[in-house]
Structure formats: C-alpha cells, structure tokens
C-alpha cells in the first residue's frame, strides 16, 4: 500500500514533462515574422600576422682531392672462343591432317547398256617428283535411234608428271582419247517404216597429245616465266588427219609499285588433210600487256600482234595488230563497273571443230575467225561474300564466223560454212549464291542477236541460253547436285530432196527448245567407300542440238567408288 503514492508521483511527473516538451516543440516549429538586412558594401578585414623567416646556414665547402692515380696491370689470357651449339626445341605441335589417298576407282552401270569405269592414281608428295595417271571409259551400247545403230563410246587415258628443283619445275604429260560416234541422223523418212533395213556408219576419232615445259616455282618475285612445247595428232575413220606442233612462252614482270606487265608468245604449225585439201597452216602471236592497279581501280593496256596464213579472197595482209584496253573500278564490294575494247584472231582447227560438232564430215576449207573488235561493259558486285552478280553487254564484229549445216550429199553429216561479215550482240548476266558448305548456286543467262551478210540464219547457234547449277550438302556424308540447261532459238537448214533440182531448195527449220535436267547424288558410307547415282535428261526430251540427231531419253547410272 505504501508503493502506490510513489507510483502516482512518477506518473504525474512523466505526464507533466511530456506536455512541456510538446509545448516547446510547437513554439519552435511556429512561423514568426522576421527581418533580415543584407549589406553588400561591408568589408571584412583581418589583422596582419607577422611571420619570421630564418635563413639556412651555409655549409662548409669540402676540400677537393688533388689527384687520382691507379696502377693498371695488363693480363693477356689465351682463352678459346665460345662454341655455341644451338639445338631445336623438341616440342610436339598438334597438326590437324586429313588422310590423303593415292588412288581412286569408280565403277557403275546404267540403262542404254552403259558401263562406266574410272580410275586415278597420284602421288601425295612432291619431293622432288610428283606424278598422276588417270583412266576413264563410258560407252552406250544402245542409242535413241535404231538401238545399236546409234551406239557411242568414250575412252581416255592420261599421265602427268613434274620434277621440282629449288627454283624451277620441269613438267610434262601425255593424253590419249578415242571417241566413237554413229552417223544416225539420216533422213527421218527411213524411220517411218521399221521394216526398212537400216544401217549406219561409225566414225572413230583418235587423239594423242604430248607436252613438256618448265616454269619458275616462286610466283612472287620480280619475274616469272613459263615455256611449253606440245605435239598433237588427230585422225578419224575416213580421210581426215591433222598434226600440230605448238610452242608457248610467257613472261611476267612485277614491280614494288602498282605496275605490272606480261608478254605471251604462241606459235602453232598445223598440217590438216582431208579429201579436197592438204595444207600447212601457221599461227604466230605476241601479246604484250601492262597493268596498273591502284586501290579499287584496275587498268590494262596492250596489243595483240597476230600473223596467220589462211588463204582468203581480197586478203590484204597476213599480219594484224589489235589494241587491248580494259578498265574496272569497284566503288564498293556491292557495286563496280568494267569495260573493255579488244580484237584478236580466234584460231580454228579441224580438231576444235569436231569437238564442237562430233558429226562433222568432210570440210572444204579451214579458216580462223577474225574478231575485228569487241566492245564490252557491265556491272558486278558481291554482298558479304555470299551473293555475287555480274551483268554486261558486248558487241563483236567478226570475219569468217563459222556455222554447221547438214551436208547436201549426206544429211547425216555436217559441213562448215562461213559468213564473211558478222555482228554479234550479246547480253549476259551471272548470279551466284552460297550458304556456307550447305548450298551453292551458280547461274548464267545469255541472249544473242546475229547480223549476217551471206548466211540466211545463224545455223545451229542459239538465240538464248540459261544454265543453273545447284549443289546441296544436307549432311556431311551426302552431296546432291541439280543442274538444268536450257537452249533455244536454234535454226537449221533442211534440203527438200524431192524437188529434183540441183541444188535442191531448202527450208529453215526451227528446232525445239532444249531442256536438260541433271541430278547427281553421292553418299559416303566410309572415308574410303561411297555410292553414287546420276540421272541425265530427266525430262525425257529429244533435245535436238543438231538437226536429225535426237539424244538418249532418261539415262540413269549407278555405282560405287573406292579410295586406296
């Protein structure tokens, strides 16, 4: 009971103190009227405080020593020179190497009785000899007309070798080829009745070539050179023979500035023989060039000096000089332009003609093509090294431009005709695309227009061509190719033999557009063993490139390849 007054006392003191604190807080927080005086001219002065400075004492100067004298005693020691024997650091570096195989063989078989056999063998080192040999045979026992009467066969064998010294490579090689064709493109009337006897003649083309030469190995020095000697022999099953001797030499100059130059020299002596002629043909050319490259600008100037002895009416001289001017400027990787003006003599031989048209028969005369001038220009560019394009136009003025027409004596064989003055316009475009190693595309479109003087049409020459090549790699072991070739606007001369006139009249035949779809696939089972399949003319078109000569239909070949 006594504690109660004490508690009451402390509670009253606490409440009194709390009320006084609240009152003081209210007084300090209240807003009251105040007056402030700001004087701008008032100056505060501070009395000067005297400071004392003491000078550093002067240190006594040391007395210098008068002389220094040393006694030097020479010592002559007979010490041999140090013999250093450095040794290479024996450290194993890890180098990723792909296993290389010396040999490759491929074999297959397809419809039209078509066996395929191909092989290659080469050395994988070049110290100091490098060599390679190759062989290929593919034949078609049956063809598009008369089965065995339109058979075809191709065989090729070649070898190459090089011997390397410190500065020079001595190289050489040989190649032998045999191609068998059948002249099955006779008058179509013979095939309307299958009971009529039908037999075609064959033509076997034999070709042999050997060459040897030397060239420098270092291609970055001030001078590079190369010289080569070649001999070629060609013969068919009839009267055609052609031997050729060739000498080729080239010299390149490089400077430490933006200038460079080169000189190419070519000489060929050819002696073709046929039913109506046996001549000696000579072709000699010198092609000097000088080039200037400055950043994105490139310029080339030169001459083509050519001498050839073809016999042509009203020919002024065997010697011709043509200028060569080329320039290009790349504003950026995405856009640039190019232009050129040049002239030359295109060398033609019976061998080059028969490679263009294997159904060629006897010829009356072999002539080179004179390209008086060629003017070309266009644009080109690329985007991020994945997409590239090129588009251009060119105009050429030609003399002795050659064409192929069916022979009047035998419609299954072709003969060569020429146009003395021709102008050819060409518009072309190229497009390429690549996505890593997965997909690549290459395509080209050509549009032609011919202005002729003698010939009624550009026989068997296309008005347009389109080529599209695709390559897929869906995964590492599978390679797929899909190519399509289109050619249109072909015209041929067909004689009307039933007219009983000499010579008989002819009509201009428009050949159908050629559409050739090719599919190829190669699957790698192991690093050494793989299988393949190829399909040609998948659209099963006749694709008549030469009048009366349809091609084989859908052609399939399958097989396997092995590396060793």
Image (tube, grey):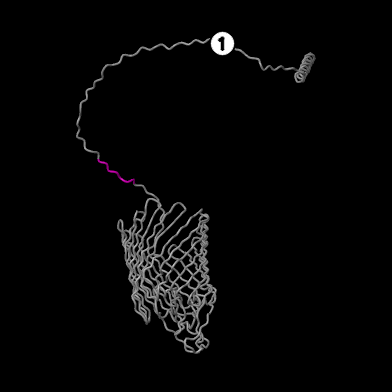
Q: Which residue is mark 1?
A: 48
Q: Residues within 10 Å of mark 1 (few under 14, many from 20)?
A: few
**Under tag 1, what secondary structure?**
loop
Q: Position of residue 387 (x, y in %)?
A: 53, 58
Q: Residue at x 53, y 87 (%)?
A: 192
Q: Nearer the viewer, residue 536 or 49?
A: 49
Q: Is residue 33 above or below residue 426?
A: above
Q: Is residue 365 above or below residue 441?
A: below
Which image quarter: residue 347?
bottom left
**From where the camera sits, is residue 155 visible?**
no
Q: Position of residue 178 (x, y in %)?
A: 38, 75
Q: Position of residue 457 (x, y in %)?
A: 51, 76
Q: Is residue 122 left or right of residue 515?
A: left
The answer to whether residue 103 is magenta is no
**From where the camera sits, is residue 427 visible?**
yes
Main SS of the magenta part reads loop
Looking at the rendered structure, the number of numbered marks drawn on it comes to 1
Q: Nearer the viewer, residue 44 or 467?
A: 44
The residue range painted magenta reads: 83-89
């Amino acid at each position: 009971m006594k504690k109660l007054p004490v508690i009451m006392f402390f509670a009253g003191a606490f409440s009194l103190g709390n009320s006084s604190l609240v009152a003081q807080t209210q007084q300090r927080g209240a807003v009251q009227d105040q007056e402030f005086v700001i004087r701008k001219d008032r100056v505060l002065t501070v009395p000067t405080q005297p400071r004392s400075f003491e000078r550093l004492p002067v240190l006594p100067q040391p007395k210098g020593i008068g002389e220094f004298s040393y006694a030097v005693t020479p010592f002559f020691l007979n010490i041999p020179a140090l013999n250093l024997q450095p040794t290479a650091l024996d450290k194993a570096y890890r180098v990723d190497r792909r296993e290389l195989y010396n040999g490759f063989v491929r074999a297959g078989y397809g419809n039209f009785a078509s066996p395929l056999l191909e092989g290659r063998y080469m050395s994988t080192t070049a110290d100091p000899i490098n060599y390679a040999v190759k062989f290929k045979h593919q034949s078609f026992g049956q063809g598009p007309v008369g089965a065995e009467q339109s058979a075809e066969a191709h065989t090729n064998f070649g070898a190459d070798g090089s011997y390397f010294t410190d500065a020079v490579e001595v190289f050489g090689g040989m190649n032998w080829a045999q191609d068998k064709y059948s002249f099955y493109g006779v008058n179509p009337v013979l095939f309307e009745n299958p009971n009529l006897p039908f037999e075609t003649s064959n033509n076997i083309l034999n070709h042999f070539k050997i060459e040897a030469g030397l060239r420098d190995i270092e291609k970055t020095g001030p001078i590079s050179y190369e010289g080569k000697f070649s001999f070629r022999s060609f013969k068919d099953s009839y009267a055609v023979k052609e031997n050729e001797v060739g000498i080729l030499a080239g010299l390149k100059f490089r400077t430490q500035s933006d200038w460079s130059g080169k000189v190419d020299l070519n000489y060929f002596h050819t002696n073709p023989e046929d039913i109506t002629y046996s001549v000696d043909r000579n072709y000699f050319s010198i092609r000097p060039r000088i080039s200037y490259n400055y950043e994105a600008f490139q310029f080339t100037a030169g001459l083509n000096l050519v001498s050839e002895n073809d016999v042509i009416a009203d020919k002024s001289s065997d010697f011709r000089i043509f200028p060569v001017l080329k320039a290009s400027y790349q504003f950026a990787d995405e856009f640039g332009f190019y232009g050129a003006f040049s002239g030359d003599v295109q060398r033609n031989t019976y061998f080059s003609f028969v490679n263009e048209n294997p159904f060629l028969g006897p010829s009356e005369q072999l002539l080179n093509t004179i390209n008086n001038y060629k003017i070309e220009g266009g644009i080109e560019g690329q985007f991020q090294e994945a997409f590239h394009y090129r588009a251009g136009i060119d105009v050429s003025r030609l003399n002795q431009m050659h064409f192929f027409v069916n022979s009047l004596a035998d419609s299954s064989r072709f003969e060569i005709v020429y146009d003395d003055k021709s102008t050819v316009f060409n518009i072309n475009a190229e497009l390429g695309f690549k996505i890593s190693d997965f997909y690549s595309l290459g395509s080209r479109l050509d549009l032609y227009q011919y202005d002729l003087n003698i010939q009624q049409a550009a026989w068997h020459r296309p008005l347009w061509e389109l080529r599209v090549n695709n390559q897929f790699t869906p995964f590492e072991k599978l390679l797929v190719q899909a190519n399509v070739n289109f050619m249109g606007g072909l015209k041929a001369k067909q004689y009307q033999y039933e007219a009983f006139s000499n010579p008989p009249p002819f009509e201009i035949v428009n050949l159908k557009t050629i559409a050739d779809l090719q599919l190829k696939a190669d699957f790698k089972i192991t690093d050494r063993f793989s299988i393949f399949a190829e399909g040609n003319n998948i659209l099963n078109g006749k694709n008549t490139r030469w009048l009366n000569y349809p091609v084989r239909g859908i052609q399939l070949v399958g097989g396997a390849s092995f590396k060793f």
